[in-house]
Amino acid sequence: MKLNWFKYASPVTFYPLAGKLIPWFALAAAGLTLAGLYLSFFVAPTDFQQGESYRIIFIHVPAAWMSMFIYVVMAAWAAAGLIFNTRLSSMMASALAPTGALFTFIALWTGALWGKPTWGAWWVWDARLTSELILLFLYIGFMALHAAIDDPRRADRASAVLALVGVVNVPIIYFSVKWWNTLHQGASVSMTMAPKMAATMLLGMLIMALACWMYSIAAALARVRCIILEREQQAEWVANLSREST
Amino acid sequence: MIWNSLGDFIAMGGYGFYVWGSYLVTAGLIVAEILLLRARRHAVEKSRQAQALLSE
């Protein structure tokens, strides 16, 4: 049997599918968060240099990863919307933006609270921090531009261009600690080198990152379902939905 | 066991403000997002019900 992926490129078929998937992603997010928090606070040892303040890493790094990853996914959906003119793709991009902005803010916030005890400053204008702040502005700009244009399809196209231009910032964030002399430390985990931390610390961080993934998927699917209903209210299939419980 | 008492756990070796400030604000923001999503959902449902009444 051939699976037709394009079947789910239409809001009509994607809407119920998303509804079925949300509880599973939410459940996975909750379970992984509990496991991750247990590892973060009760298994991972105290850091010999930073004491207990390093425990911020278990949200800071996953949030920072998500902030960049969600942006790339959002821009990819926006690009698909531009190229194939599929309205669901653009809706997915819009659904991801607030969650991406949330994780960007969390990364900046926890970074400030970690920077104060370790560097002695809440904020410094180094390349890593500044480029991450620009990422937050890109998310806000994407949402604001979309909201400012009344015709949703025009708004999709305009904000897609903004999202695509902004992608250039993601490698800048990622490589900033290599390209410039930053106060921010280099990557703790990279593809090419062995991680520079204890195994239980790494495991806790990876599980928290996985929890953030599951949460982001659940939140984006829940939001895209709202967007579909808002935008397709005039469509017959949406009108028929009200007969059943949604 | 890393912690000897609850007080020890809350103090976080003197970094309690920074550690809990990170975790509680993150938790609060995620709960806020979930509530906002729920509110948006309810708003859409309401407007759909109103439209269904109009079309009848």
Image: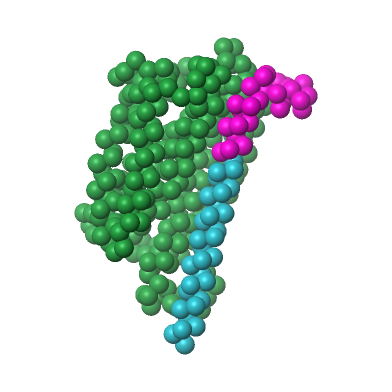
Magenta includes B25?
Answer: yes
Would residue A246 be found to the left or right of residue A8 on screen? right
Q: Quadrant of the N terminus of chain A?
A: bottom left
Percent coordinates x, y for residue A221 in the rendering: 45, 55
Report the front residue among A11 and A114.
A114
In-front residue for pair A18/A174? A174
Residue A112 percent location from the top left of the image:
50, 27
Q: In this orientation, which residue lies closer to the viewer: A164 or A45?
A: A164
The answer to whether residue A57 of the structure is visible from this angle is no
Residue at 59% of width from left, 43% of height from top? B28
Task: Please state if A61 lies on the left or on the right of A90 as rendered.
Answer: right
> Which colour denotes chain A?
green
Residue A158's x, y, as percent?
25, 53
Q: Residue at x 57, y 32 (%)?
A: B22
x, y (%) of residue A200? 58, 23
Q: Residue A17's quadrant in the figure?
A: bottom left
Q: Which quarter of the figure has residue A137?
A: top left
Q: Residue at x 52, y 71 (%)?
A: B46
Compared with A108, A164 (above or below) is below
Task: Report the predominant secondary structure element of the magenta stretch.
Answer: helix
| Relative to A36, residue A24 above or below | below
Q: Quadrant location of residue A234?
A: bottom left
Residue farthest left in this picture: A83
A137 w.r.t. A91: above or below:
above
Q: Residue furthest bottom?
A: B56
Left or right, A126 with reference to A105:
left
Q: Is residue B4 visible?
A: yes
Tell me the colour chain B is drawn in: cyan
For the record, the magenta segment spans B1-26
Is A65 part of what is drawn in magenta?
no
